[in-house]
Amino acid sequence: MCPQEHRLLIGGDLNGHIGTDVEGYARARGGFGFGIRNEEGISILEFAVAHDLAVANSFFKKTDAQLATFHSGGHSTQIDYLLLRKGDLRTCGDCKVLTDLTCSSQHRLLVMDLALRRRVTKSVRPIQPKILWKKLIGEKAVTFKTSVVERIDASVEMTPNDDADQMWICLASTIREVAKEALGVAVGTSRGHKTDRESWWFSDEVQSKVALKQLRFRELITCQEGTSTDRTRVEERYKEAKREAKNAVARAKEKAYEDLYRKLNSKEGANDIYRIAKARERRRRDIDNIKPEHHEDLQEADIEQFQINRDCEEINHEEVRMALRKMGRNKAVGPDQIPIKAWWCLGDDGIRWLTCLFNKMFRSSKMPMEWRLSETIPINKNKGDAQICESKEELNRRLEQWRVALESNGLQIRRQKTEYLRCDFDRNDDVQEDGVNICIGDQILHPQTSFRYLGSVLHKSGRIDEDVSQRIKVGWLKWRSATGAQERRMEVAEMRMLRWTCGKTMLDMIPNSVFRENLEVRSISDKLRKGRLRWFGHVRMRPLTAPVRRVEALTFV
C-alpha cells in the first residue's frame, strides 16, 4: 500500500483500449481518447475508479499521432497509459506521445510533464540569547555590581603560574551569569516571536497587559471544545485584554515620545543632536580629507631586532582607567558578550581586575584563548595613515618594496607599459614639476594627463571636459550604428513580427503598408529618427527671441 501523503504514478503497457467514449467512467478519464473501448480497457477504467486514479493520456487534446502508442502493420492503437492519483492531476502539465522517438520497433515513447514542488523544511538554527545590557541603569546596575563583586573570589588575583586564561574565564563567566540573572535576555529574531521584546518605550504596565492578553489568548485556544457559552465568555475576556493592552501601548509610546522631545529641548539633548550630526559628517568624508598620522619609519632590520623589554614597569590602575575612558560607547560586543559599559559599572573593582589580568598577560606573553576567536577586519574610519606619499622619494621607495615583494613570489611588472597619473586638483597645469622621476627599478615611468577607467576619463586637474566629450562621442557612435544596414535589419525583423501577428507570410504577397494600416504601427526607423530629434521639438517651442532661435534668422554670405 502506498501512503496517501506519497505521490503514486503507474505507467506501462496495460494492453487495453479505453476508447473515446466517456460514459460511465467520467471520474477516471478525460474527454479525449483513441479507438474503441474493449474488455481490457473496461478493466483498466474500473481499476482506476476503485483506487481513485486518473488516466493522464485522456485529459489533453492531442492529434491521433500523439495519442497512439503502438504501431504495427499499418494499424495504430493506444495500449500504453500513465495513471496518477485524482488529486495530483493538477500537477500534470501535459501528456503526449513523442512521434519522432521510439522505445522499440512498434512502441512510441509516452511522456508526461509534472510540476513537483519540493517540500521545504525550515532549518532550526541555534539562537544564542542576547543579554539586555540596555537595562544596566539605576537599581539594576547597583544589583549587578554587588552580585559580581560577591561572586568573584579575592583569590582571582592570585591565580597560580600567572594563568591569564583561567582568570579571564572566571571574570567573563561570572559577569555573564550575573547579567543574565539581573538584566534578562532576549531570545529570538525579528521574524519570530520574542520572549522579551527590545522596545525602548516598553514599561512595566505594558508588559503586564501584554502578558495578560497572551494568557487570555491561550485560554481561548484551549476552549475550542467547550460549550458555546463558555467560548463566548472566554472570547469576550480576550477581546477586553487585547483592548487594554492596545491602550497601554499607546499611552506608553506617547509618554516616551514626550520625554524624548522634552530632553531634546534641553542642553543635554542638544549635545546629543550635535554628536549625531558630527558622526554623520565624519562618515560622509572622503578619503582625501583624512589627516594622516606621521609615525617613525621602522626598517625591516630594526623590526627583526625589536624585542619586548620585560624589565619595564607594570601596568598601573590609572593607565587602565584612562584606556576605558577613551573607549567608545554603544559599540557591538565581541564573542565574550561583555560591553564597555559593564566595566564602567564595576568601577574601581573592574579596573583592579583588568590591571591584574593585563599584568599577567604581559609577564606570561600569552593572551586568553577566548580573545583569539575575534576577527580583525581593517576598515577605514578616517583615522591614521591612508597610504599617502608626501614626496616622490617616498613613492619611489614604496614602489621598490612592491616590486621586490612581487618578484620574490614569481610575479613581474611590465615596466615599459606602466604609467602614472598625478591628481593635483588644487594646482594649475602650468606648475613646474620638480626634477625627481617616478621609477620602478631602473625604468622611468611616463606621466599622463588623463586616464580612462570604466568608461570615465579622469583628468589630473579634475576637469570633466574630456569626460563629457568622450561620452558625447560614444553616444553619437551608438546612434550612427543604428542607421543604414542596422536600421534596415530592424525594419525586416519588425515586418516579420507584424506578419506573424496577422497570421500571414511573405508568400501571401501583401504589401507592408497594409499591415501598418491595419495595426496602426509606424516604421521603427521613424521612431528612431523621432527619438534622435526629440530635443529639436523643445527648441521649436521656444519663442523667436530666444538665443537658440535667433540662429534661424542668420544670413550667411
Image (tube, rainbow, N blue to C red):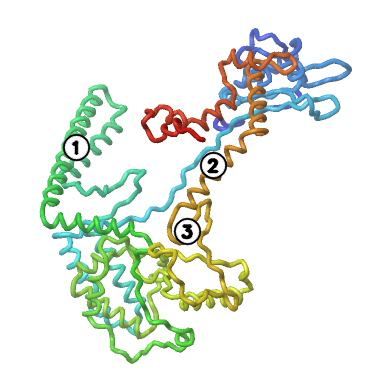
Q: Earlier in the sequence, mark 1 or mark 3?
A: 1
Image vertical order of residue 125 relative to residue 444, above or below:
above
**In which image quadrant can residue 92 be found?**
top right
Q: Decide: marks 3, 2 in contact (CB < 8 A)?
A: no
Q: Give the image location of residue 87, x and y in percent.
A: 56, 23
Q: Give the image location of residue 188, x and y in percent.
A: 34, 49
Image vertical order of residue 524 relative to residue 471, above or below:
above
Q: Considering depth in this image, is 378 or 311 the residue closer to the camera?
A: 378
Q: Residues within 10 Å of mark 3 (few under 14, many from 20)?
A: many
Q: Residue furthest right?
A: 73
Q: Residue drawn at (55%, 27%), measured in percent from left and top?
A: 527
The numbered mark at residue 475 is 2
The numbered mark at residue 257 is none
Q: Considering depth in this image, is 136 or 242 the residue closer to the camera?
A: 136
Using the numbered discs, state the Cα–Cα distance from disc 1 to disc 2 in whole angstroms: 63 Å
The numbered mark at residue 459 is 3
Using the numbered discs, state the Cα–Cα distance from disc 1 to disc 3 in whole angstroms: 64 Å
Say which element carries label 2.
helix
Residue 354 in the figure: left or right of residue 74: left
Q: Earlier in the sequence, mark 3 or mark 2?
A: 3
Q: Considering depth in this image, is 269 or 494 the residue closer to the camera?
A: 494
Of the two numbered discs 1 and 2 in the rendering, the one whose residue sits closer to the viewer? 2
Q: Residue drawn at (59%, 30%), measured in percent from left and top?
A: 115
**In which image quadrant can residue 42 be found?**
top right
- Amino acid at dot 3: His
Residue that numbered label 1 is attached to: 245
- Amino acid at dot 2: Gly
Q: Earlier in the sequence, mark 1 or mark 2?
A: 1
**In which image quadrant can residue 209 be found?**
top left
Residue 173 in the figure: left or right of residue 68: left
